[in-house]
Amino acid sequence: MKVVGIGGIVLFLFGGLVLIIGLVVCLNTWTSDYATSTCERAEKDREKFTEAKAACGSPTSDCYRQATAGLTSDDDCEAKKEYMNKQMLMGIVPAVIGFLLAFVGLIMAVVGFVVGRRRKRTVIAP
């Protein structure tokens, strides 16, 4: 049963490491202003897009493309929001899996060493 206890410790440590990595990714994503700053720029540039469309007509014309070069569109904002949501998901999944592995490892370690000690006592003291 000591093998189960040692395996539980290894699983607990591995799960804890995965949990920490997942939590760091979640924290980094949560505090990032990557999408927020892009959406603020898109809000400021929305008026310039409207002016360019009024002056040039079709959004497919060269005039429109030159007038809007370097501006941030609403599509850029949505794309970065979607990217950040995917990144948050890529942090939550390892955090949950790491928690479950660590929890199972802790149970295995406790059960392995407790049952191992009880068997040792019953073998030595008959």
Image (cartoon, rainbow, N blue to C red):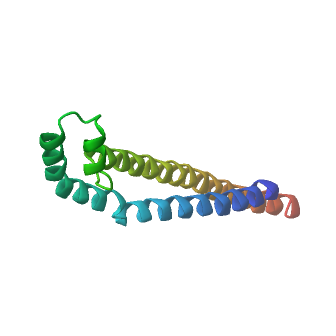
Near-viewer residue (57 or 8): 57
Quarter of the image containing the C terminus? bottom right
Near-viewer residue (43 or 124): 43
Q: Confirm whether residue 114 shows in the render.
A: no
Please, is residue 60 above or below residue 49 in the view? above
The residue located at (37%, 64%) in the rendering is 32
Q: Position of residue 123 (x, y in %)?
A: 86, 58
Please, is residue 7 above or below residue 78 in the view? below
Q: Position of residue 47 (x, y in %)?
A: 13, 51
The residue located at (69%, 56%) in the rendering is 11
Quarter of the image containing the N terminus? bottom right
Q: Position of residue 49 (x, y in %)?
A: 19, 47
Q: Kindly indicate the quadrant of the structure image that contains residue 109.
A: bottom right
Please, is residue 111 above or below residue 125 in the view? above
Q: Confirm whether residue 108 shows in the render.
A: yes
Q: Kindly indicate the quadrant of the structure image that contains residue 38.
A: bottom left
The residue located at (57%, 54%) in the rendering is 98
The residue located at (29%, 53%) in the rendering is 72
Q: Position of residue 81 (x, y in %)?
A: 34, 49
Q: Kindly indicate the quadrant of the structure image that contains residue 55.
A: top left
Near-viewer residue (76 or 83): 76
* Residue 126 horizontal side relative to residue 62, left or right: right
* Residue 2 horizontal side relative to residue 49, left or right: right
Count of picture labels: 0
